[in-house]
Image (cartoon, rainbow, N blue to C red):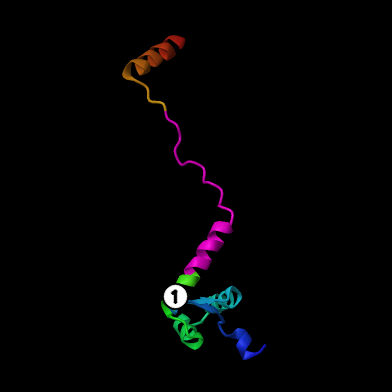
Amino acid sequence: MEEDDQKLRVRLVGRNGRRRYDPVSKDRLVAACLEPGASVSGLALEHGVNANLLWKWIRKQRLAKKETLPSPPLPTPAFIPVQIESATDRAMSRQSSAAAL
């Protein structure tokens, strides 16, 4: 690949000076930032982009990937239904068990 293919390409510069970048080269730069040992600030300097903008692109891509992944199954509830007896219910059950003997 040529060096120009790897550089971040500007697609459009608006009247206010704001640049619009080519989405393919932007995605390639974000992927390079996610490589182990990559320096985001170093890559930003190399490509002429503010590091904060590059971090914004990284967050945006991670959020987009998280939304496309299926959500994990819900865990089973940790609570077990319990019935509490009143004192009269306990007394009646004692009497009926004593009568059965």
Residue 98: where, in percent of width, then height?
41, 13
Which residue is rendered at x = 51% and y = 82% of the image? 38
Q: Which residue is mark 1?
A: 53
* Residue type beneath disc 1: Leu
Note whether 60 is above or below 15 in the view shown: above
Along the viewing direction, whichever of 41 and 5 lies nearer the viewer = 5
Which quadrant of the figure has residue 15? bottom left
Give the secondary structure at mark 1: helix
> Is residue 73 magenta-colored?
yes
Q: In which quadrant of the rendered image does the N terminus lie? A: bottom right
Residue 11: where, in percent of width, then height?
56, 78
Which quadrant of the figure has residue 69? bottom right
Q: In which quadrant of the rendered image does the C terminus lie? A: top left
Q: Which residues are magenta?
A: 59-82
Which residue is rendered at x = 55% and y = 82% of the image? 8
Along the viewing direction, whichever of 96 and 64 lies nearer the viewer = 64
Along the viewing direction, whichever of 21 and 32 lies nearer the viewer = 21
> Is residue 78 magenta-colored?
yes
